[in-house]
């Protein structure tokens, strides 16, 4: 039995909070235009009828539904349908609860408490389901804004129906590209895997190469998840599987076995609209597709089990983050109220938006949120005179800023905040025009309360379970390595069994590295087993390389036997 009591690396319980690079502008996401275009189209479709009928005061409810168009763009369309359904249901349910509470509860103190509890629940569910950006922030924004707006109980069904209908429109807009390019998400995921593997092959020796390896492994794993999430194998998906196998072989194969230039050329073809490149199967992977089919069959039930295990409960690593979010939102809201803000919903939203996987990442988001919101308030002050000239101009500006938010946010979160802040303020103009100076003052005070108090709560409410999650990931990686080594040692093992063990080992390494990075940025926890982590990763990489060599030898032997026959 392996000794798991290796000495741990003693690290300071309080780590330095970095300033460098936090506001750096990065390359945009390769699909930034998809959520940007989707939300702009959805918002236009749901706002136009209100403008035509003169009911612009209802814009808040339909815009909330239109935000459903932001979700699921990284998913294959079969999985995107399921995700979109749940997003629309979640958005509508949150709006209904907020409307009922706003109409029955008139105490601001009670409303802050309700908003905070709902924010914590939304954070937990979004983290557990891994719905992806924009995560819980949009849901919290909708619920918190609605809670502090005047409501009548008799109008709740109508307003809820508006949100639901607009949510359906947003979901349909998100799914519309499937009509012209059914395998678009799988093609993009495959192209990312090819590009990341090429980047790893070209990276120089040093710490950067280790990071490039993890990035490539995560991209390959993401491509497999995309391809395995779909139930039906089409000729296009079969060709994409061959390409992902090439990317995987380049990542874990012997040095010099793959050409990075060729991988990048394939990636360009995959991203295009033309036919996919015909690529040879890597050595020893002829039977691997049988294992892929078997894995696809059992994947849906495993996904449901993983979701149940991930939901916050005693012992879950997500529970402290959800508690942080709820407590931080409540504290920020009450501080905002004490500062004189009558409806401190933006303090709740700002606090909820900063909470990331650990304290260090939360600190990054604090700085980004603060800079972005202050700049966004300045933008609002510049455009609000124009917005008040006509309700049509106001609607156009809301659509414009929603597009700009998605265009900029993948470059850096603070850039997205520059656009989302004026959009959020302009949406309130449909129903109630307030003095500009009052709006700006409240928003700045709310932002300061949200980020400062939220950060204090993040430091005080510890998440010691990140270290436990890392140890669980270590154990899982060690077991996956043991399994792969047993399959390698058995003379009767098939290529499909070896390929399945290899993919599971690769997936466990991706999870392990993510868990290690998360734990390294958390405060107030026990020492981390750095030496064990290093040995586990080295052993797993050697096992992966042995698996590739074994598959290559098996393929050579098979070809020799065919030639002799």
Image: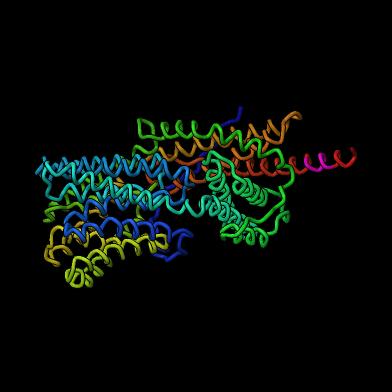
Residue at x 35% of width, y 62% of height = 403
- In-front residue for pair 526/315: 315
Residue 167: x %, y % from top left? 31, 48
Q: Is residue 557 magenta?
A: yes
Q: Is residue 344 visible?
A: yes
Q: Is 494 rendered above or below residue 83?
A: above
Q: Is residue 67 left or right of residue 174?
A: left
Which quarter of the image is occupied by the N terminus? top right
The boundaries of the magenta stretch are: 555-559
Residue at x 20% of width, y 60% of height = 443
Which quarter of the image is occupied by the C terminus? top right
Residue 506: x %, y % from top left? 59, 42
Q: Is residue 354 left or right of residue 391?
A: right
Q: Quadrant of residue 493?
A: top right
Q: How many marks?
A: 0
Q: Is residue 406 left or right of residue 443?
A: right
- In-front residue for pair 195/333: 195
Q: Is residue 360 visible?
A: no
Residue at x 19% of width, y 49% of height = 146
Q: How is the image coloured?
A: rainbow
Q: Quadrant of residue 88?
A: top left
Q: Is residue 51 magenta?
A: no
Q: Farthest residue in the top direction?
A: 1
Our reading of the magenta stretch's main secondary structure is helix
Residue 483: x %, y % from top left? 63, 32
Residue 47: x %, y % from top left? 25, 58
């Amino acid at each position: 039995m392996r000794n798991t009591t290796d000495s741990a690396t003693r690290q300071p319980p309080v780590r330095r909070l970095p300033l460098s690079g936090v506001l750096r502008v990065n390359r945009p996401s390769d699909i930034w235009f998809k959520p940007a275009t989707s939300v702009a189209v959805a918002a236009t479709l749901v706002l136009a009828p209100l403008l035509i009928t003169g009911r612009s005061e209802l814009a808040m409810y339909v815009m909330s539904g239109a935000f459903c168009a932001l979700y699921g763009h990284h998913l294959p369309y079969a999985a995107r349908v399921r995700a979109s359904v749940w997003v629309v249901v979640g958005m509508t349910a949150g709006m209904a609860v907020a409307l009922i509470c706003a109409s029955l509860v008139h105490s601001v103190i009670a409303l802050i408490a309700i908003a905070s509890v709902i924010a914590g629940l939304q954070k937990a569910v979004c983290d557990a389901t891994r719905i992806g950006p924009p995560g819980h922030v949009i849901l919290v924004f909708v619920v918190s804004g609605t809670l502090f707006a005047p409501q009548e109980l008799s109008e709740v069904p109508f307003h809820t129906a508006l949100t639901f209908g607009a949510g359906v429109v947003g979901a349909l807009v998100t799914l519309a590209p499937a009509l012209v390019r059914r395998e678009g998400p799988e093609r993009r995921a495959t192209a990312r895997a090819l590009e990341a593997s090429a980047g790893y092959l070209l990276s120089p020796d040093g710490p950067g190469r280790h990071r490039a390896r993890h990035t490539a492994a995560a991209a390959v794993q993401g491509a497999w998840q995309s391809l395995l999430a779909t139930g039906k194998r089409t000729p296009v998906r079969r060709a994409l599987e061959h390409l992902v196998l090439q990317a995987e072989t380049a990542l874990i194969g012997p040095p010099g076995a793959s050409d990075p230039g060729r991988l990048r050329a394939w990636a360009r073809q995959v991203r295009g609209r033309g036919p996919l490149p015909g690529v040879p199967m890597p050595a020893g992977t002829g039977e691997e597709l049988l294992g892929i089919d078997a894995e696809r069959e059992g994947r849906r039930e495993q996904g449901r089990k993983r979701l149940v295990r991930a939901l916050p409960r005693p012992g879950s690593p997500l529970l402290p983050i959800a508690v942080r979010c709820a407590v931080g939102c409540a504290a920020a809201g009450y501080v905002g109220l004490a500062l004189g803000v009558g409806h401190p919903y933006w303090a709740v939203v700002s606090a909820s938006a900063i909470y990331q996987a650990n304290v260090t990442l939360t600190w990054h988001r604090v700085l980004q949120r603060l800079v972005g919101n202050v700049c966004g308030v300045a933008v609002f002050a510049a455009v609000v005179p124009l917005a008040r000239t006509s309700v049509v101009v106001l609607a156009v500006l809301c659509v414009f800023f929603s597009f700009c938010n998605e265009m900029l946010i993948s470059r850096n979160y603070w850039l997205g905040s520059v656009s989302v802040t004026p959009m959020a303020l302009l949406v309130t103009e449909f129903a109630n025009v307030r003095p500009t100076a009052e709006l700006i003052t409240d928003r700045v005070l709310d932002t300061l309360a949200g980020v400062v108090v939220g950060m204090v709560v993040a430091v005080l409410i510890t998440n010691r379970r990140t270290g436990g999650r890392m140890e669980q990931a270590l154990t899982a990686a060690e077991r996956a390595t043991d399994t792969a080594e047993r399959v390698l040692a058995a003379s009767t093992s098939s290529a499909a069994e070896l390929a399945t063990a290899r993919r599971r080992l690769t997936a466990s390494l991706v999870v392990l590295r993510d868990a290690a990075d998360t734990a390294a940025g958390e405060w107030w926890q026990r020492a981390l087993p750095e030496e064990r982590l290093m040995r586990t990763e080295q052993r797993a990489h050697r096992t992966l390389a042995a698996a590739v060599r074994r598959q290559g030898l098996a393929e050579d032997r098979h070809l020799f036997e065919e030639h002799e026959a």
